[in-house]
Amino acid sequence: MDEDHLNIEIRRFLKKVGISSQRIIENEIYQAEKSKKIQMGDEIKLEMELKIVNTNSINKISGNIIIK
């Protein structure tokens, strides 16, 4: 297996995920703030699920952000 090629492919995928995820999170937070579902100072809990279809692997990554 070509490790350099694998690394480049993974980084390309993660860049796509990162950009898309940031846009989704920002839009959701702006909409939730407009509809008064959240407010300044709230802690937003996030969870990301990474599924590798070929291996039937599912991993969850969790974190929090605070709205200021």
Image (cartoon, helix red, strand yellow):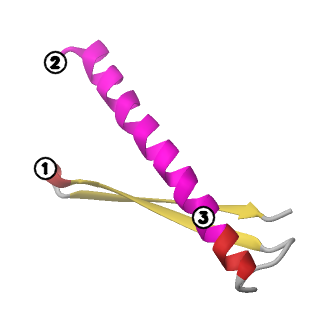
- Distance of mark 2 from mark 1, alpha carbons? 17 Å
Residue at 75% x, 86% y is 36
Would you say residue 5 sits in the magenta stretch?
yes
Choose the circle earlier in sequence order: 3 or 1: 3
- Distance of mark 3 from mark 1, alpha carbons? 31 Å
Residue at 30% x, 13% y is 4
Can residue 30 be seen in the rendering of this structure? yes
Residue at 50% x, 44% y is 18
Can residue 63 be seen in the rendering of this structure? no
Label 2 crowd bin: few (<14), some (14–19), many (20+), radius 10 Å = few
Q: Which residues are magenta?
A: 1-29
Q: Residue 43 at what x, y percent from top left? A: 75, 71
Q: Look at the numbered disc 3 and give the secondary structure of its residue.
A: helix
Which residue in the structure is indicated by mark 3?
Answer: 27
* Picture quadrant where residue 29 is located: bottom right
Q: In what quadrant of the picture does the C terminus appear?
A: bottom right
Which residue in the structure is indicated by mark 2?
Answer: 1
Which residue in the structure is indicated by mark 1?
Answer: 54
Q: Look at the numbered disc 2 and give the secondary structure of its residue.
A: loop
Would you say residue 8 sits in the magenta stretch?
yes
Q: Amino acid at mark 2?
A: Met
Label 1 crowd bin: few (<14), some (14–19), many (20+), radius 10 Å = few
Q: Amino acid at mark 3?
A: Asn
Q: Residue 66, relative to residue 15: is it above or below?
A: below
Q: Nearer the viewer, mark 3 or mark 1?
A: 3
